[in-house]
Amino acid sequence: MVAPAEILVKSSSDNVLKLVLSGQWNLGQNLPSTEEVLQHLGSSAVEQIIFDSKDISGWDSGLLTFVKRLRKQAEEKAIPLDISGLPQGAQQLLALAAAVPEKKDARTADKRRLFLTILGEETVELCRSAGKLLDFVGAASLAVVQFMRGKATFRKTDLLLMLETCGGQALPIVSLISFLVGLILAFVGAIQLELFGAELYVADLVGIAMVRLMAAIMTGIVMAGRTGGAFAAQLGTMQVNQEIDALRTMGISPMEFLVLPRMLALMIMMPLLCLYANIMGIFGGMVVGVYMLDIGFIQYFNETVTAVRFWDLGIGLFSGFLFGVIVALAGCMRGMECGRSASAVGDAATSAVVTAIVGIIVTTAMITIICNILGI
């Protein structure tokens, strides 16, 4: 049977408190507390504390914990603690623990910063991010120029794979979102237009809204979350695994080999996806018009063709093209800027989606303002 840990407190004539330790001092057992020692510290004029551990049969970190608590209490009362009577291993561990300095900022309290300080730091970071964006856009533009000259270094199979990923595999989600958006627009318009007996103009509302604006915006947001985040995660993982550094070492431009196929794929597929989203949105509005408002199928179709102009279709497809460029640049840029840790990959994907969506909304506002000025 293992002897439990015990402590015997002895006081000598020269005001030295001697602690006689015996038994098994293991952390998993019920160790003696420091209360008895503290009673002697408070009731007598103790000038030093020493240990006698020749009767200890075994010890682990439980002994170190006991000594550390006792040392803290002794320091508060300005009483020296002599650990020379402890086992040699315990002395070394205690000395090592005392020798490790505490980090300077380990217990630094949160300091309140002035609003102007925060504003200045955010402004500087914004300018730095804008510089990185311009640098990346310039490098991507040079890669496109190299492609047009036929000198870009990338695999044709990568481009075909990206076309499939950005096009065919995105059709289900684009179909669902576009159909529901057209359905919602028709419902909202029908409620108001029924008040004036103008239910037929639901076709005008859905057709113009989808072709000119909503199809491109919804497709762009879907592709930002689905494809832009995937691009950032892929390139971020390659950055963590130092594959991008390996390409540079071999003299291969990462912009041409990795970014260019992804950017070309989205530039090609986004207008086509927008065109498909137009059809699905108009079909969603037609379902409401035909089955809820009792509008004839041919009548609804003719009203849509009459309302939608060529300029509306051109603006929507051009917006889709720009949104494809924005999503590709945001995803690839955040992936190339990714850090060297696993958490940085997730941060890059999140940042890519947010950047792409903000870029899509800002670009939409600019296109709307320009179209309003030009009267188209």
Image (cartoon, helix red, strand yellow):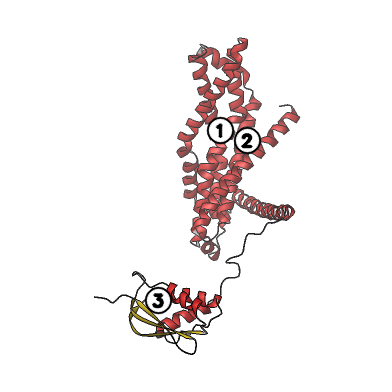
Residue receiving disc 2: 319
Say which label, 2 or 1, has the lower sequence index: 1
* Structural crowding at the residue carrying mark 1, measured as other residues with C-alpha within 10 Å and reported as few (<14), some (14–19) or many (≥20): many
Quarter of the image with the N terminus is bottom left
Image position, residue 355 (x, y; %): 61, 46
Q: Find numbered disc 3 in the image and state the secondary structure of the residue it sits on.
A: helix
> Is label 2 in contact with label 1 (beta carbons under 8 Å)?
yes
Residue receiving disc 3: 63
Q: Is residue 236 left or right of residue 322?
A: left
* Structural crowding at the residue carrying mark 2, measured as other residues with C-alpha within 10 Å and reported as few (<14), some (14–19) or many (≥20): many
Q: Amino acid at mark 3?
A: Leu
CA distance for labels 2 and 3? 72 Å
Image position, residue 250 (x, y; %): 53, 64
Image position, residue 316 (x, y; %): 62, 31
Label 3 or label 1, whichever lies nearer to me, is 3
Residue beneath the point at 46% across and 42% down: 164
Count the numbered circles shown. Answer: 3
Residue beneath the point at 64% across and 23% down: 309
Q: Residue 105 has which mark?
A: none
Quarter of the image with the C terminus is top right
Q: Is residue 263 visible?
A: no
Residue receiving disc 1: 274
Residue beneath the point at 61% across and 26% down: 209
Label 2 or label 3, whichever lies nearer to me, is 3
Can you say whether 274 is above or below 351 in the image?
above
Say which label, 3 or 1, has the lower sequence index: 3
Q: Find numbered disc 2 in the image and state the secondary structure of the residue it sits on.
A: helix
Residues 53 and 7: in front is 7
> Is label 2 in contact with label 3 (beta carbons under 8 Å)?
no
Q: Amino acid at mark 1?
A: Cys
